[in-house]
Amino acid sequence: MCGIVGYIGFRKADQVVISSLKRLEYRGYDSWGIAVKHNNKIMLVKRVGAISEDKMHEMAEGNIGIGHTRWATHGKPSEFNAHPHTDCSGEIAVVHNGIISNFQSLKEELEKKGHKFKSETDTEVISHLIEEFYRGDLKDAVSKTIDVLRGSYAIVVMHARKEELVAVRYKSPLVLGIGDEEWIIASDVPAILDYTSRVIYLEDGDVVSLTKEGFEIWKGNERVERKIETIPWSIEDAEKGGYDHFMLKEIHETPRVIEDTLFEYISEGVDIDVSFSAGISEIIFIACGTSYHASLVGKYLIEKLTGIPARVEFASEFIYNQPPMSRSLVISITQSGETADTLEAMRIAKKHGARVLAIVNVLGSTATRIADHVLYTRAGPEISVAATKSFIAQLVILYLIALKLSRLSRSEIERLAEELRVMPELVRKVLEQEGKIEQIAGKLAGYENMMYIGRGIGVPIAMEGALKMKEISYIHAEAYPAGELKHGPFALLGKNTPVIASLVPDETYEIMLSNIKEVKARESLVIAVADEHDSEIEKYVDFVIRVPKTDSIFTAITHSVALQLLAYYTARERGCEIDKPRNLAKSVTVE
Ligand code: AGP
């Protein structure tokens, strides 16, 4: 995810901005840039790749500057697309986090007025709009600009002839650091902490004017006061946003990730472009690990909602199985876009003449270059090896595809789309169960074996739950369809093997209760993940993790977040190295 920084004070701005951007490197980025005001001119440096100081001597002595690390969304990683973006005169420079959803229509209007654009980004419309509105008052021009912007944004702006920075926040974080005669504004606290620990967390709609004399915060026409807080964290803590591990931070980012992914593909209705599916006779999912489990949910949704035949293949096994046909749509799911097995399976699919759609989190990754079509998840960089928020973002895309291709009635599709829209809120409610889940994890941490069970959509939920548990806690965790227990795995059950059961409120519910009774008869400890209104379940199991009520198809989201937390707290209780489990890598680039 992008990072932004702005500095005004007495130090050399290029040095402050560069060092602060480096503090944001952990968030991931593919390009970067900085702008410094000097002698009534804007000096710009933009680069693809890692932050370096090769051109910094050109920045001279200016002590007003802005900078940005970019995680590409609109347009590939390139110097043109890197921020800061300028207007036609080159006097206004802008850095931006977020998405301007109406940038296309704004760009067309601005082009009609003669504005020339240099990048493919949504951000560049902001600098040109400010230029349109600028009459000598930068804050006024920025306020008029945000009146016409739709989407989410944190923006910092400078003007070559003003001793001022103007910043604004709407649905994208922005923190103002208050030093002694210097001010630094950034998207994230680590960028600030080297200079001050006194901060103001800006609120949506706040417009800040920073000069060398001080700062003012405005909301509309009114000047407002905001509380100054003191950050008690070290830099390292701050990178994790105060969480003990990136995994926990990333789980907590899930509501925002769902919002960002939905924002991209849903407005009045489900707007995802499914032209890739024209004339197809089957869908084949290929993926590895967690992305494979997302594919299993995808197959369930496609078959249930659309009637199109679907199968799922481990990417590493694809070559040995029934090859695709020219009318097959191959959907490859990969967070990193660099998993060697998945890339190879995509190449094989293309050799057979199949159409390939990639669902990817990392822009510009190899998978995006092999695929015929790409849909991006908006999970932002995922640092912990265990995939969490990226898995949920993959599911969101799969729901959108299945709904768009669905043969359900229009009203039923609208009902489900509405449920999907409230999913961020439901995930927040799951996160509120954290304390309870931590207590249950405390009971599990001493075991060496576990069994996860489910039926229907509960099977991939169980498989992903077990994968999370095994990879970070090193507990041997297996997942089975509940109906399969009697065909072998029952032999493993007993006091030493707790069972985690996903209870989905659909046609599988009653039979799951019977299966749980059978498990309890073998004296296993049973933990159920169940609907908040389920008054039956407590009679059958030892502990219940409650999740908010939703349509059964969306339990893949609510249950999975609960099981991610269960794995996290179990691993933590066992003292495991959670973010970097032994023998594993975030991106598996060998077959
Ligand atoms: C799960 O937590 C792992 N990180 C792993 O299973 C991962 O999902 C798998 O290696 C596939 O990675 P990809 O999505 O980047 O292709």
Image (cartoon, rainbow, N blue to C red):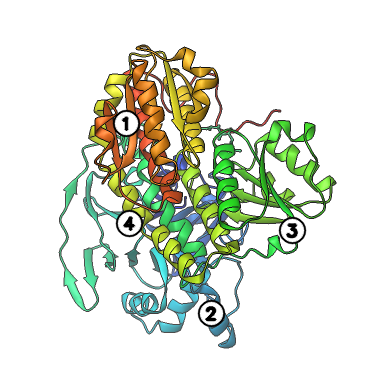
- Residue at position x 50%, y 67% from top? 123
Residue 67 placement: quadrant:
bottom left
> How far is the residue under mark 2 from the one under mark 3?
33 Å
- Residue at position x 36%, y 80% from top? 144
If you read the primary sequence from the N terminus, does the residue marked by circle 3 or circle 4 appear first?
4
Q: Which mark lies nearer to you, 1 or 3?
A: 3
- Asked if residue 341 lies left or right of residue 14, the reply is right
Tell me the element at label 2.
Answer: helix
**Disc 4 residue type?**
Leu
- Residue at position x 45%, y 44% from top? 556
Q: Is residue 277 visible?
A: yes
Disc 3 designates what residue? Answer: 280
Disc 4 designates what residue? Answer: 174
- Asked if residue 171 lies left or right of residue 325, the reply is left
Q: Which mark lies nearer to you, 4 or 2?
A: 2
If you read the primary sequence from the N terminus, does the residue marked by circle 1 or circle 2 appear first?
2
Q: Which mark is residue 105?
A: 2
**Disc 2 residue type?**
Ser
> How far is the residue under mark 4 from the one under mark 2?
27 Å
**Disc 3 residue type?**
Ile
If you read the primary sequence from the N terminus, does the residue marked by circle 4 or circle 2 appear first?
2
Tell me the element at label 4.
Answer: loop
